[in-house]
Amino acid sequence: MLIRGDGLADTMSRYLIRRIEENPRIVVRTRTQVVALEGNERLERVRWRDNRTGEVETHDIGHVFIMIGAVPNTEWLDGCVVLDEKGFVKTGPDLSRGELDTAGWTLARPPFLLETSRPGVFAVGDVRAGNIKRVASAVGEGSIAIAFVHQVLQRA
């Protein structure tokens, strides 16, 4: 496993890090990045560089899984809904009274579980603060959000 940074702690849950560390078949190389994918009709080799030493290694590898990071693309939402310090959308009980007041929350009720600081706007999946970053949980959150949307529409 190649990691461009110093480790996994900034972008991955402790649970996943522990599973990686406990697997004897996984070798973690930090401050290392892929510099070339090579092959003719398919992937045959991968070259990577150790950014500490500058050394480039070539290995016969036929499959690559790329995770480009866990940084949410939410800059465009800043000022529209409350984001946490990492840029994830805060929802429901994670929103403080002060954050709701600053955002202009005007309803008597608190936000629903997946509702943002803007009434009737919901966030689900990886973009939401507190989400466990699994497809199954995102699907489940989507189903729950639809139920809340129906409640919002009935009250309108």
Image (spheres, rainbow, N blue to C red):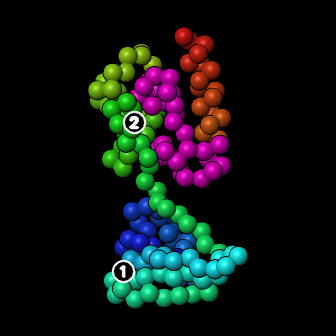
The percent coordinates of residue 24 (x first, y second) are 58, 84
The residue labelled by disc 2 is 77
Q: CA distance from mark 2 to mark 1?
A: 34 Å
- At a point 39% along the width and 36% down the height, the residue shown is 77
The vertical placement of 129 against 62, above or below, is above
**What secondary structure do most residues of the magenta stretch adopt?**
loop
Q: Amino acid at mark 2?
A: Leu
Q: Which mark is residue 36?
A: none
- At a point 33% along the width and 83% down the height, the residue shown is 52
Q: Which mark is residue 51?
A: 1
The vertical placement of 47 against 155, above or below, is below
Q: Earlier in the sequence, mark 2 or mark 1?
A: 1
The percent coordinates of residue 122 (x first, y second) are 52, 31
Cβ–Cβ under 8 Å for marks 2 and 1:
no
Q: Residue furthest top?
A: 156
The percent coordinates of residue 51 (x first, y second) are 36, 80
For the residue pair 73 and 82, the one nearer the viewer reads as: 73
Count the marks. 2
The vertical placement of 31 against 98, above or below, is below
The percent coordinates of residue 145 (x first, y second) are 59, 31
Q: Amino acid at mark 1?
A: Asn
- At a point 41% along the width and 42% down the height, the residue shown is 74
Decide: few, some or many residues near mark 1? Use Cα within 10 Å; few <14, some 14-19, many ≥20. some
Decide: few, some or many residues near mark 2? Use Cα within 10 Å; few <14, some 14-19, many ≥20. few
Per the image, label 1 sits on a secondary structure element best described as loop
Report the span colored magenta.
110-139
